[in-house]
Image (cartoon, grey):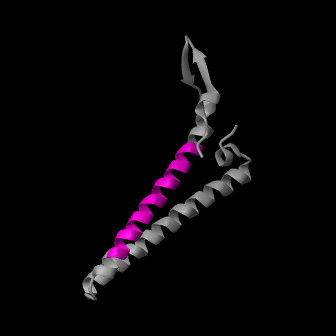
Amino acid sequence: MFANLSACSKNLNNVDVISLSCIPQLLYNVLNAALILSGSICLVILIVSGIQFVLSGGENKQVEGARKSITWAIVGLVLVLMSYLIINLIATATGVSCILLGNC
């Protein structure tokens, strides 16, 4: 899931130092972590909003609030997935496959 940064680190005075060659792997790790985090947050929001929707008892104000939360959670997830798709398209078009695969 995450790229190993120790492969691109250099040993300097018996201390492992991450060099500039680690930037693509670091970017890969950040993108994956952001995707996992946003998906998890969206799932929690959808579950909580679904519970609010069920427990609203038919009150229009609570039903509308739950619907808006569900709608915006789905919109946010779509935006995150579209941004991930755009990054993948740019990486493929420019030939920077390190960002996609995490192994440079």
Q: Pick the quarter of the image with the C terminus.
A: top right
Q: In x, y percent, where is residue 13?
A: 55, 10
Q: Residue at x 44, y 64 (%)?
A: 42
Q: Residue at x 57, y 64 (%)?
A: 82
Q: Is residue 88 above or below residue 42?
A: above
Question: Which residue is nearer to you in this view: 82 or 33?
Answer: 33
Frontmost residue, 51 versus 102: 51
Magenta stretch prevailing secondary structure:
helix
Using residue 70 as the reference point, say whether residue 79 is left or right of it.
right
Task: Give the magenta-colored segment's residue range.
Answer: 28-51
In the image, residue 3 sits, relative to residue 6, either above or below, namely: below
Q: Above or below — where is 67 with respect to 100?
A: below
Q: Residue at x 64, y 28 (%)?
A: 8
Q: Quadrant of residue 72?
A: bottom left
Q: Position of residue 74 (x, y in %)?
A: 47, 71
Residue 13 is covered by the magenta coloring: no
Residue 65 pos. (x, y %): 30, 78
The residue most toward the top is: 13
Q: Is residue 50 magenta?
A: yes
For image coordinates 45% across by 59% down, the residue present is 40
x and y, in percent, of residue 39 in the image: 48, 60
How many marks the image carries: the answer is: 0
In the image, 52: left or right of 21? left
Considering only vertical position in the picture, is 35 above or below 57? above
